[in-house]
Amino acid sequence: MSGDLRLIDAGGDLDIDSVSGDVSLRASGPVSLTMNNVSGDLSAQAPTFEHLRIQSVSGDVSVDGELSAATPHGVDTVSGDFRLASGSGITVSVRGMSSDIHSALPHRLEGSADRRRLVLGDGAASVAFNSMSGDLAVTRSRQRPGPAEGSAAAAPLSAPNADERNKILGALERGEIDVDEAMRRLGDRS
């Protein structure tokens, strides 16, 4: 009901229901994630999301990982923001009354007003984001792919922990910092 949930080294099919607690997921393998949330924030990181279906009333949603192009994905909020960090080609269909769209990655923006599409790369993976007033921010994934054959292993990025990340996203939401400063603090590498 109101406790926070942390899942580490998870994988497979996950179905999560939460009322007011924050949920933090750090998956070590592919994930199919279904989540219903009332007011807590969700932070999910996985190498690949095979399926993503999230419904939240006022909690912010942060997803970091490749999205499978095999199935459509969806995120619905009333007032929560959606931060998507990925390196794959994505098409995000945005329906929102007063939703702003920000992308730190090269993209095309199509449509107008309350029906827009943000296309990155080949646009192969499909995500529907529906919100009354939540914003969309797209950034580069903080996860690094495995080293190429014959290359030295890359050092891991030092990312803020969940509490620090929530403080940074809160400062962004309150307008205390801009998207570029939030990305710098979150450790994104553009």
Image (cartoon, helix red, strand yellow):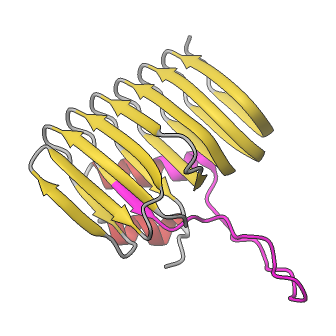
The answer to whether residue 19 is above or below residue 168 is above
Q: Among all residues in the image, which is located at the extreme right?
A: 150
Q: Quadrant of residue 9?
A: top right
- Name the residue nearer the viewer: 13 or 56: 13
Q: Residue at x 19, y 60 (%)?
A: 110
Magenta segment: does it hold 71?
no
Q: Let me know if residue 89 appears in the view.
A: yes
Numbered label tally: 0
Q: Residue at x 72, y 70 (%)?
A: 145
The structure residue drawn at horizontal position 34% and vertical position 40%, both measured from the top left corner, is: 129
Q: Nearer the viewer, residue 32 or 184?
A: 32
x, y percent for residue 114: 13, 43
In the image, is residue 80 above or below residue 155? above
Q: Position of residue 158 (x, y in %)?
A: 68, 68
Is 97 situated left or right of 53 in this image? left
Which quadrant: the N terminus?
Answer: top right
Residues shaded magenta: 137-166
**Prevailing secondary structure class for the magenta stretch in the rendered image:** loop
Q: Position of residue 73 (x, y in %)?
A: 48, 39
Q: Is residue 177 visible?
A: no
Specify whether residue 138 is painted magenta.
Answer: yes
The correct choice, above or below, for 104 with respect to 86 in the image is: below
Q: Residue at x 76, y 71 (%)?
A: 156
Question: In the image as oriented, which residue stretches furthest toward the top?
Answer: 1
The image quadrant that residue 151 belongs to is: bottom right
